[in-house]
């Protein structure tokens, strides 16, 4: 039994360690699993990163299906990981339980809201960790911390036993120490069945998405794409302005948050951290009449994206528009990051597409990750791409 955790510096939720043995044997034998504090573990309270949520909910009666599947395949739960409060952040800070330390630079943020899961894997405290991704909450911390991660096709992994946030965007994602383990965990979580091999995905560059990134991210990714001979260009946003993708996401996500969490917030009047409280206030103040026009916009944008993206393509785009933010970043810098990050995340988010993240090797400074998005249902092909790239990834040019 591990000693109680007094702080969340390496991603773990403070308090007695939540440990559960594997329930079976399989491809994950011996794997140490961390579980985000939004996902049920039998007998433990799912606290959602907020003490008032934890105090108002009973321990989970059973494992979430995603946890149960990994335990059956041989993974052992070694702890619950810190979540940004009720998943409403991309920065990775938690005013109640602490901010996990960045694995390379203690002056940088780990990214959120699956901050603890990314940090635990990056620190080597877990081999595999579950997170959730709505607007980028797996993809951003993976990019910030430099670990492999996957956001699956929306609906591929059941959301039973997962704290709801914005259900038409919510997914269960996962982090792993390398691309091979990321793929093995995906086979378990996705229920992959053996079949004839499918051809490799054709790699393209989403140039308009890449243009949203800071030079510290854009230039290494562009150089890597040239090194790999990836020269086919695509448009992630099409004829629309990226700000429309952002606005549609902000309104539609906010209205879903209002529907899912608004009643509890109204009853409990919970204590939120200073950065989180205004976000919930803004979501609860949204006019529901904004929903139908943006829902129609979303449907049309998704249809046009499906026309642009061939079923055998994978598009390179940034998982995050900047390297890991400084803990001292001011409101203006955070706001600019947040807008671009949500717009980039909305490409997969609006359409329910799978997206994989893989760290580039070599180089100095904060991590830079390569990321690919593909058509719905191409999860296994993206995971195969990640495993292949991880086994032969050249140093960052």
Image (spheres, grey):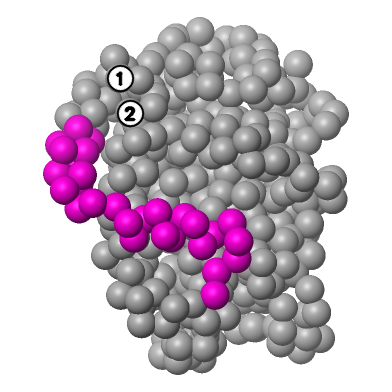
Where residue 391 appears, x then y in whole percent?
67, 35
Other residues around mark 2 within 10 Å, as few (<14) / some (14–19) / many (≥20): some
Query: In the rendered structure, does residue 134 fall within the stretch colored magenta?
Result: no
Q: Position of residue 219 (x, y in %)?
A: 67, 16
In the rendered image, the vertical position of residue 85 relative to residue 389, given as above or below: below
| Most foreground residue, 279 or 93 | 279
Task: Give the CA separation, mark 2 to mark 1.
Answer: 7 Å
Of helix, strand and loop, which one carries label 1?
loop
Tell me the quadrant of the picture where the N terminus can be found: bottom right
Is residue 169 placed above or below 210 in the rendered structure?
below
- Residue 352: x and y in percent read 31, 43
Residue drawn 71% across and 87% down? Answer: 16
Q: Which residue is mark 2?
A: 244
For numbered disc 2, what is the local secondary structure?
Answer: helix
Residue 165 appears in which quarter of the rendering?
bottom left
Q: Magenta part of the protein: which range?
A: 271-298
Residue 204 in sight in this render: no
Name the residue: 72% across, 67% down: 98
Q: Position of residue 18 (x, y in %)?
A: 64, 83
**Residue at the spot x=39%, y=24% of the render?**
242
Q: Are marks 2 and 1 in contact (CB under 8 Å)?
A: yes
Tell me which secondary structure the magenta stretch mostly adopts: helix
Q: Which residue is mark 1?
A: 240
């Amino acid at each position: 039994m591990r000693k109680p955790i007094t702080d969340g510096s390496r991603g773990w939720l403070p308090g007695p360690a939540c440990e559960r043995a594997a329930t079976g044997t399989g491809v994950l034998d011996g794997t140490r699993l961390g579980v985000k504090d939004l996902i049920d573990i039998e007998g433990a309270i799912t606290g959602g990163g907020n003490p008032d949520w934890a105090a108002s909910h009973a321990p989970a009666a059973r494992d979430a299906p995603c946890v149960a599947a990994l335990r059956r395949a041989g993974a052992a739960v070694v702890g619950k990981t810190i979540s940004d409060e009720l998943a409403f952040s991309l920065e990775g800070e938690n005013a109640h339980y602490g901010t996990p330390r960045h694995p390379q630079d203690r002056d940088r943020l780990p990214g959120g809201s699956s901050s603890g899961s990314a940090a635990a894997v990056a620190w080597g405290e877990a081999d595999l960790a579950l997170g959730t991704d709505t607007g980028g909450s797996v993809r951003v911390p993976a990019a910030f911390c430099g670990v492999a991660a996957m956001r699956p096709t929306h609906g591929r992994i059941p959301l039973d036993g997962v704290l709801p946030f914005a259900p038409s965007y919510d997914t269960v994602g996962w982090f792993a120490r390398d691309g091979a383990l990321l793929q093995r965990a995906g086979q378990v979580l996705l229920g992959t069945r053996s079949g004839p091999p499918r051809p490799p995905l054709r790699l393209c560059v989403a140039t308009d998405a890449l243009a949203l990134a800071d030079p510290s991210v854009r230039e290494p990714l562009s150089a890597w794409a040239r090194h790999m001979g990836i020269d086919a260009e695509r448009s992630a946003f099409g004829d629309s302005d990226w700000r429309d993708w952002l606005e549609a996401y902000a309104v539609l996500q906010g209205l879903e948050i209002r529907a899912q969490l608004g009643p509890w917030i109204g009853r409990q009047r919970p204590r939120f951290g200073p950065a989180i409280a205004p976000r919930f206030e803004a979501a609860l103040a949204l006019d529901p009449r904004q929903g139908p026009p943006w829902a129609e916009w979303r449907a049309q944008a998704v249809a046009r994206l499906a026309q642009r993206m061939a079923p055998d393509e994978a598009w390179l785009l940034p998982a995050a528009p900047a390297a890991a933010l400084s803990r001292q970043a001011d409101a203006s810098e955070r706001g600019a990051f947040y807008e671009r990050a949500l717009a980039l995340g909305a490409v997969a988010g609006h359409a329910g597409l799978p997206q994989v993240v893989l760290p580039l090797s070599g180089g100095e400074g904060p991590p830079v990750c390569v990321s690919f998005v593909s058509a719905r249902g191409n999860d296994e092909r993206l995971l195969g791409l990640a495993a292949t790239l991880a086994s032969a990834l050249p140093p960052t040019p």
